[in-house]
Each structure stands twice: as structure tokens, then as C-alpha cells.
């Protein structure tokens, strides 16, 4: 989802250009000065022994970038932060992935990394919630938990010594995601935060911003509700559970389209910005399907330019 | 036929002997690819898409598990040439060019940083007017950089020929089919290393040096342009991200 296919008319094109130009002028000058491309020399002070981080190599005593991105300096460390690239996992990241294969005792997940991630049967809570050793019966019942093409939320556990990436889902909040939409955006648009699960109360919607650029927008589920239903209750409750009210579906679509527009414009995705965009579309009576049109695209760019200008002004005023 | 006008010194398409065709590069043209680029050299127009690094699909192809596997597929669109002709997928010419592009790109990709994964490069010629090989390599470089794949250096390629006792830079289709010597050079620009050198004719040593020199100059000019495109794209993304 790198861009939307838009046909802008003359005025819209001019407006978009002005908005993007403004965004460019608002960005700190240091940001564009630190941009490098492949094989650019990164200026460093040779006296203080620096550490070469990701995206750099040593060529004849010079530090040279191997990626396109922005140079970051942390004390002695110099590295290149990439923009457009695949996901780079870090331990503890919350991610959303899709099951592509069931292997002995494990599921393989596509998570936009250079290899498939592995979720072991032993590193997730069983549906009955009892802590015990996984038996051969559990292994046979793996399809009862997740099947191929299921969307799953999990946490990065770490790299095994053979280099494979392992995940874990040891909490009620992790697990299968149902009744919603999965959106894939470039991972650099999602910042690592304390909170990646968001319950948007006003919409009755759950929003999960996976660090790997997979974003889930779905109907809100109460944590631990599934385990309570037993026996006779189950039949009637599953019927009720399978039904998502129209209102909620509309909210899901609106939020999903907000994410689509923002990612096409390349803005960092935060909950606030997504909600703000969705609200703006609702308040200005933009139909859900029109949110992916040219007009709303331009409006969003303009709104963001204005928002950032206000922020900057506030910051300068505070000083 | 006069390929270089003896009076004015201009070529068939009005260029000077050491003049390149107009370059145009654009990244991010394929929505679902990790990296993609469109590259034009005059009327030659090539699109490249990079998928990966991703999980290896066919374990049998894996040579070394500590390095990424690079694969490349070159294809000419049916409508790309003057006579519209359906070409079989695995013909010798395209297999050879696929191999050439793969080897050239592999020389610059830091494959050891992406163990147990594969990188797929797909290049398709949309419009052929000579020098498709060079255009494909340039497009692939742009696409790989767009995909955020670590590379040693920018690889660029340019062709040069020798017609009417004049070294000519960046041959077009008419000059290419004249049957004279045609040298395709690919270099790592910053390290000044040659990764590709193809010539399908004989040339005296001193003339060859001149022609090769000219081609290298061309490569460097393309590299400057490619870096401009990439830097502009990086800056734009960073600014919009905020």
C-alpha cells in the first residue's frame, strides 16, 4: 500500500504541493541534512573512536553508508536509520502476523521480516488456560487454535541460536484476531511506544499498531470473555458473537481508511492522528469510500501541515 | 551508413559522440513490492521490482545458509520492440541477461547481513531502444536501494561503442544494430571497481581503452543522477514522517 491511485485535478494538485512544501519547510533542517544514500561518506571526527552501527561499513578509513536513510548519532555510536525497509525485530515488540504454515509443535508466521517467525506451541497459553506440559494431543489439536491465514497478535521473544525468530503469546491479550481489518504499512511509520493495544471506547473498536507495520482494526473483544462461556451458553453466545453491529463495522472501515490515507501520505501513525483523521472525515460528512479519494487526501495533508505548524509555534512560544 | 556526420560531428539522433541520452528515474512505482523503480535512458524504459529479503521459497536453490540468495528475472515486454513478437519465457538471450544482472547486483549487495533469506529482482523492459542491459542494471540498483537492502556501493552501467572511427557513448538501437563493437561496462562507482564488462567484437587495445574510459564516464554520470533521486526520496520521506 505505497500510494493510492488518485487523479488529482489542477487545484488539488496545487494545494497538495503547497501542503507538502510546507511540511518540508516545517521539518527541522537537521533532518534533511542527515539524510544519506548508499555509498555516501558519513562525516565523523576520527579522533574520538566511534562505533559503527547498522547501515555503515568501513572503507579505506572512511565511514560509508550502505543504506538510504538518516544518520543517527548516540554518543559514540553512528548508525543509519532506514526508512523504506523491511521490519527489524527487537525483543518485546508487539507484532501482528499471519499464519502461513503449521509445522510440528509450531506455527510459522509472516511478519514482514526477512524470514518467517516461529510461534511454538509451548510458548503460548492454551485456550483452557491451564499451565501444563504440552502433550501429543495438544499437538494434534493445533488447528483448533490457529489455522492457516489466521491473523495473530504476539510478542517478539528473541532470536534462537540458529538464527530463527521466535514469538510468544503468553497473555490473554495476545492471540487470534477476528472481525476486523488487517492493514500493512511500511514499518517505519509505527513508532515503538509503551502502548500498542488501543481500545477506542467511543467506537467500540480495538486498534493494534504492530511494530512490524501490520495494523489491526477490529471489533472490541473483552479480554478473557471467551474462556468464560461454557456448555449451554456457548451456542447462543456464539451466535451473538458472530454478529458485528453495522455501526461498529462502519467505524472499523472509517478508521481503516484513515490509516490507509495517512500511510499513503507517509505520516507517522499514532492513535491520536488516526482518530483525528477519522473524526475529521465524519464531521465533514465524507463518505467512508470517499476517504480514499483525492479530495480527502489533499485535506489530510493540509490538516497535518497546519497541525505541525501549530505545534512548532507552541514550542517556540514556550521558549 | 553514416553514424556520425562527418561535417557536424553529430550522431543519428542528434547527440554528440560523448553525450548520453536523457535520464529519468523514479522509485516506488510498484505498490506491493518492497522496492521498485522505473528507469529511462532516452527511449529505453525499464521497470524493476525487488521482493525481499524474504523466506527462501525453494530450499534446493540455497547455496550457503549464511548468505542471502539473490535471484533475478529479466523479461522483455512483447510491445517493447518495433516488431511485436511473442518471445518464449526462457530464451537464451533473456536467461543470459538475467544471469548478468544477478551477478552484477550480487557483487554489491551485502548478502552476509541477511542469512537464510532470498532477494528477488524482477526487471522488465517496457520499451527497448538499445542499452537495455545497462538500463536494467541501473533500475535494479534504484529498486534495491529503495527496498532498504544494504549495498557496498552503487552499481551503474553504461554502454559505449566504436563507429566511424569515433567512440560513442550510450548507443541507441540504430547504432547498436550497426554491428560495430559494443562495450557494456558496470562499475561500483565509489570503489572504482568493474563488476561487468561485455564486448562482442574485436577492438584494438588503445581504442578499447578510449571506449571503456568513455563508458566509465557515463557510469559515473548515471551514478550522480541515481544518488540525486535517492537522496531526494529519502529527504521527502523523512520530512513527511515528521
Image (cartoon, rainbow, N blue to C red):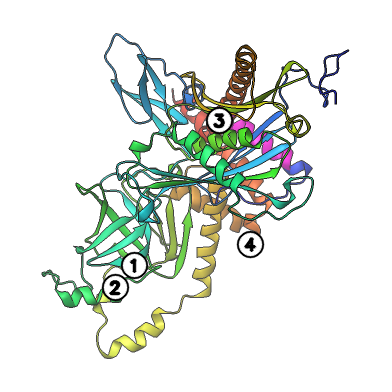
Residue A12 x %, y %: 73, 43
Residue B60 x %, y %: 36, 55
- Spatial distance from mark 4 to mark 1, Cα to Cα? 28 Å
Are labels 4 and 2 assigned to the same chain?
yes
- Residues A250 and A154: in front is A154
Chain of the residue under the numbered disc 3 shown in the image: B
Q: Toward which corner of the image does residue A172 lie, by quadrant? A: bottom left
First in sequence: mark 4 vs mark 1: 1
Residue in view at x 41 percent, y 47 percent: B118
Residue B142 x %, y %: 55, 35
The mark closer to the camera, 4 or 1, is 1
Q: Which mark is residue A289?
A: 4
Report the magenta residues as a range. Answer: A13-26
Whether A254 is drawn above or below A83: the answer is below
First in sequence: mark 4 vs mark 2: 2
Identify the residue under disc 2: A145
Are labels 4 and 1 assigned to the same chain?
yes
- Residues A80 and A232: in front is A80
Secondary element at image label 1: strand
Q: Contact, CB < 8 Å: mark 3 with mark 4?
A: no
Q: Is residue A209 left or right of residue A22?
A: left
Mostly what secondary structure, the magenta segment?
A: helix
Amino acid at each position: 500500500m505505497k500510494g493510492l491511485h488518485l487523479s488529482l485535478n489542477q487545484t488539488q494538485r496545487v494545494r497538495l504541493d503547497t501542503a507538502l512544501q510546507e511540511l518540508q519547510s516545517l521539518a527541522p533542517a537537521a533532518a534533511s541534512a542527515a539524510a544519506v544514500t548508499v555509498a555516501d561518506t558519513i562525516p565523523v571526527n576520527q579522533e574520538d573512536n566511534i562505533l559503527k552501527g547498522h547501515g555503515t561499513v568501513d572503507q579505506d578509513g572512511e565511514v560509508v553508508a550502505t543504506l538510504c536513510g538518516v544518520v543517527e548519532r548516540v554518543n559514540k555510536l553512528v548508525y543509519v536509520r532506514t526508512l523504506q525497509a523491511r521490519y527489524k525485530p527487537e525483543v518485546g515488540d508487539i507484532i501482528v502476523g499471519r499464519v502461513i504454515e503449521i509445522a510440528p509443535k509450531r506455527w510459522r508466521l509472516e511478519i514482514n521480516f526477512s524470514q518467517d517467525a516461529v510461534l511454538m506451541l509451548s510458548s503460548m497459553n492454551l485456550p483452557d488456560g491451564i499451565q501444563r506440559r504440552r502433550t501429543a494431543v495438544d499437538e494434534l489439536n493445533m488447528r483448533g487454535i490457529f489455522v492457516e491465514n489466521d491473523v495473530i497478535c504476539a510478542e517478539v521473544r528473541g532470536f534462537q541460536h540458529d538464527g530463527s525468530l521466535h514469538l510468544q503469546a503468553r497473555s490473554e491479550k495476545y492471540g487470534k484476531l477476528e472481525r476486523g481489518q488487517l492493514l500493512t504499512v511500511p514499518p517505519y511509520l509505527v513508532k515503538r511506544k509503551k502502548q500498542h493495544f488501543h481500545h477506542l471506547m467511543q467506537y467500540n473498536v480495538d486498534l493494534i499498531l504492530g511494530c512490524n507495520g501490520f495494523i489491526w482494526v477490529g471489533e472490541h473483544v473483552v479480554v478473557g470473555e471467551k474462556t468464560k462461556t461454557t456448555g449451554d451458553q456457548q451456542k447462543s453466545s456464539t451466535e451473538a458473537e458472530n454478529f458485528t453491529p453495522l455501526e461498529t463495522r462502519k467505524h472499523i472501515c472509517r478508521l481503516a481508511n484513515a490509516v490507509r490515507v495517512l500511510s499513503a501520505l507517509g505520516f507517522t501513525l499514532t492513535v491520536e492522528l488516526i482518530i483525528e483523521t477519522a473524526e475529521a472525515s465524519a464531521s465533514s460528512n465524507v463518505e467512508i469510500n470517499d476517504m480514499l479519494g483525492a479530495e480527502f487526501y489533499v485535506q489530510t495533508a493540509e490538516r497535518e501541515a497546519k497541525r505541525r505548524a501549530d505545534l512548532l509555534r507552541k514550542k517556540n512560544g514556550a521558549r | 551508413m553514416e553514424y556520425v556526420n562527418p561535417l557536424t560531428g553529430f550522431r543519428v539522433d542528434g547527440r554528440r559522440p560523448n553525450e548520453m541520452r536523457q535520464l529519468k528515474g523514479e522509485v516506488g512505482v510498484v505498490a506491493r513490492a518492497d522496492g521498485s523503480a522505473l528507469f529511462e535512458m532516452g527511449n529505453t524504459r525499464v521497470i524493476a521490482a525487488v521482493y525481499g529479503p524474504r523466506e527462501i521459497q525453494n530450499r534446493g536453490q540455497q547455496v550457503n545458509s549464511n548468505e542471502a540468495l539473490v535471484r533475478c528475472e529479466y523479461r522483455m515486454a512483447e510491445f517493447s520492440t518495433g516488431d511485436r513478437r511473442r518471445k518464449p519465457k526462457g530464451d537464451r538471450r533473456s536467461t543470459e541477461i538475467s544471469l548478468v544482472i544477478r551477478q552484477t547486483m550480487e557483487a554489491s549487495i551485502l548478502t552476509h547481513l541477511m542469512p537464510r533469506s532470498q532477494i528477488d529482482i524482477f526487471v522488465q523492459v517496457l520499451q527497448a531502444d538499445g542499452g537495455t542491459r545497462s538500463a536494467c542494471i541501473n533500475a535494479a540498483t534504484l529498486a534495491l536501494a529503495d527496498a532498504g537492502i544494504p549495498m557496498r556501493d552503487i552499481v551503474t552501467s553504461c554502454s559505449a561503442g566504436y563507429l566511424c572511427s569515433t567512440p560513442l557513448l550510450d548507443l541507441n538501437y540504430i547504432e547498436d544494430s550497426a554491428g560495430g563493437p559494443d562495450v557494456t561496462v558496470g562499475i561500483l562507482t565509489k570503489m572504482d571497481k568493474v563488476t561487468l564488462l561485455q564486448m562482442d567484437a574485436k577492438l584494438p587495445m588503445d581504442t578499447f581503452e578510449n571506449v571503456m574510459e568513455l563508458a566509465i564516464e557515463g557510469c559515473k554520470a548515471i551514478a550522480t543522477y541515481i544518488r540525486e533521486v535517492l537522496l531526494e526520496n529519502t529527504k521527502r520521506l523523512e520530512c513527511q514522517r515528521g
